[in-house]
Amino acid sequence: MRGVWKDIKSLDLRATAALLLTAVVLLLLEFKGQASVWRVQPWLKARYPMPVDLDWASQVAWALSAAVLLGFGPFLFAVLGMRMRPRDFGFRWRGFVRHLPLYLGLYLLMVPLIWWASTRPSFLQTYPFPHLARQDAGAFWRWEAVYLLQFAALEMFFRGFLVFSLERRFGLHGIFVMVIPYAMIHLHKPMPEAFGAIGAGILLGYLALRTRSFYGGILLHFGVALTMDLLARGARGP
């Protein structure tokens, strides 16, 4: 048993805690936070009897669940439980502002791929997530506001909390550790997007470590998602 205790003491507590929290958070998001889970809740079905309204409420509930589970909860855990300062896991403006042209350039490189994706049936059947946002302009922009909150939490978790928590123990290899759970949350997405998440996760993780900020990831990720939603909505016509 001495060997077991010695092995436990050799663990990097920050990396270990971050990885365990990742497992817990992603399982909670899958079993408690998905829109499909919210859609079958009796109280939500009673409040929104029309299918299109229930779909809308379920998608918003998913986005808010993701914001809490990926953003608010891990932030408190890092600050209060792991004694990390926000700047220790990517809350910095300086690196983001200095590298803003780089992120804008990456967005422009992505536009042709987004346009191609917007012509594929699998993407048109998926985006925007709420059916109401596909039909109503006001609902579309309300959805994008909630969607942005979800992306901010997602980037804070994967390219902020997780990759910075792993940096001390794994260095740049922590990026590839981070990409594994990040790719897994794309299992419900179209296959090209799911595989693309591997490369995107590596790139955004590397940029976060190099710029010491995950803010650029929010800008790029949401910019791509917003463009996809706009093109998909436009492809359906008025």
Image: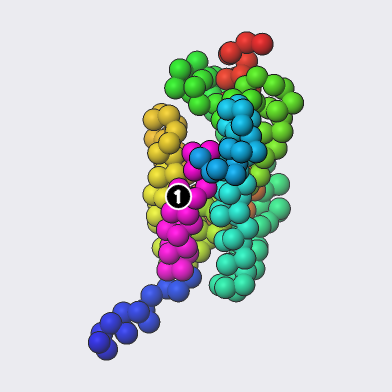
Query: Which colour assignment does the render follow?
Result: rainbow
> How far across and how far down the image is residue 27, in percent?
43, 54
The residue at the point 49 percent across, 22 percent down is 125
Say which of 70 and 12 sits in front: 70
| Snapshot quadrant of residue 51 | top right
Q: Residues within 10 Å of mark 1 (few under 14, many from 20)?
A: few
**Which residue has dot 1 on it?**
31
Residue at coordinates 45% horizontally, 17% vertically from top-left?
121
Relative to 157, 135 lies left or right: right
- Numbered disc total: 1
Dominant secondary structure (helix, strand or loop) of the stretch shown in magenta: helix
The type of residue carrying mark 1 is: Phe
Q: Residue at x 63, y 34 (%)?
A: 48
Is residue 157 located in the magenta-colored stretch of the structure?
no
**Rendered location of residue 198, percent (x, y):** 41, 41
Q: Is residue 1 above or below residue 202?
A: below
User: What is the x, y in percent for residue 128?
Assistant: 58, 27
Vertical side of 161 occupied by 147: above or below:
above
Residue at x 49% of width, y 43% of height: 37
Q: Measured from the top left, where is residue 71 in percent x and y?
A: 60, 55
**What quarter of the picture does the N terminus occupy?**
bottom left
Most distant residue in the top direction: 237
Q: Give the residue furthest to the right.
A: 138
> In what quadrant of the picture does the C terminus appear?
top right
Q: Nearer the viewer, residue 193 or 24?
A: 24
Indicate whether 33 appears above or below 50: below
> Regarding mark 1 in the picture, which secondary structure is present there?
helix
* 20 within the magenta span: yes
Q: What segment is highlighted magenta in the picture?
A: 15-39
The answer to whether residue 4 is left or right of residue 95 is left
Q: In the depicted view, which residue is nearer to us: 131 or 13?
A: 131
